Amino acid sequence: MLNYIKESFKLTNKFIILATPLILFSLLSSLYIIFSMNGNLLGLIFAFILFIMMLGAFLSGWFFMIKQAILSSEEYEDPNFLIKEFPAGVGEYFLNSLGMIINIFMVIALFLVLSYFVGMKFIGQIGISAAAFSKAVVSPEALRTFLLSLSDEQLFRLNAWNLLLLSCMIITYFVIFLYPPAMFYKDKNPFKAFFVALKDLFSKNILKNILLYLILFVSYFLISIVTTILGGNILAHFVLTLVNFYYMIFAAVLIFYYYSKNYVN
């Protein structure tokens, strides 16, 4: 696993041009969300559909760039050739990426529904109204006061629900984390690619897959904690923003590189 991480760092540093589409999409999508929030229900639905199409265009071009970076890592001295691959990836994988996004939403929804029924059966309701909870998350002080007002049983159930949802998130991301490379390497059909990814996920390399996923999950968790703690400082916030962008590129490259070496070559 260390060899995959080492090579992925090399690829990330060599093809740091991968940061350009990611940063541009983050900026444009953030502005789009801000300006599209003010509107009626029909307008919000239309804005959501357009955002999904924007996301599909970005993922199709960006993942194709990562695939080409790994395939051509020794053929091209100038890494800037990758920027030309983005429109090619959009043209080839746009509709497939939209299907992948829809499938991921369905998987997430399925696991959330299952976790809800499991929670209601084994944990039960907390006894907190939605209005009270929404007021509690306005500020840290309000949240602290809200938590102190809860009984021991309510606190126990609240922690149990948090643990259940965290477990649901971990399992969901594990199920889909080989999905993108499976579609870009093996089968363009997003529905077939999902089952191809599941087959590869639970293959003889299951322990290696779990190890890779745990490395990614723990490292992202640690970066998130540091970002939350130091996010109030302007300089630290700027540096950590760059670190988060770099990590997203590295994680995507690592997953694609790992998949290409274990399931493609």
Image (cartoon, rainbow, N blue to C red):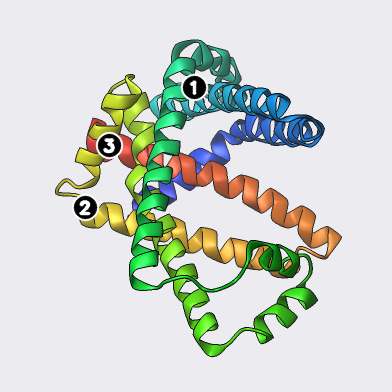
Residue found 43% across the figure and 51% down from its top: 6
Q: CA distance from mark 1 to mark 2?
A: 34 Å
Residue 262 occupies quadrant? top left
Relative to 206, does residue 258 appear above or below in the rendering? above
Question: Residue 263 in the image: x percent, y percent?
Answer: 23, 36
Reading the image, the residue beneath label 1 is 76
Question: Residue 50 in the image: x percent, y percent?
Answer: 64, 22
Residue found 36% across the figure and 59% down from its top: 117
Asked whether the beta carbons under mark 3 and mark 1 sit within 8 Å of each other, the answer is: no
Given residues 151 and 100, the one toward you in this image is 151
- Give whichever of discs 1 and 2 has the lower sequence position: 1
Question: Where residue 216 is drawn, which disc sits there?
Answer: none
Q: Residues within 10 Å of mark 1 (few under 14, many from 20)?
A: few
Reading the image, the residue beneath label 3 is 197
Camera-nearest label, 1 or 2: 2
Reading the image, the residue beneath label 2 is 206
Q: CA distance from mark 3 to mark 1?
A: 30 Å
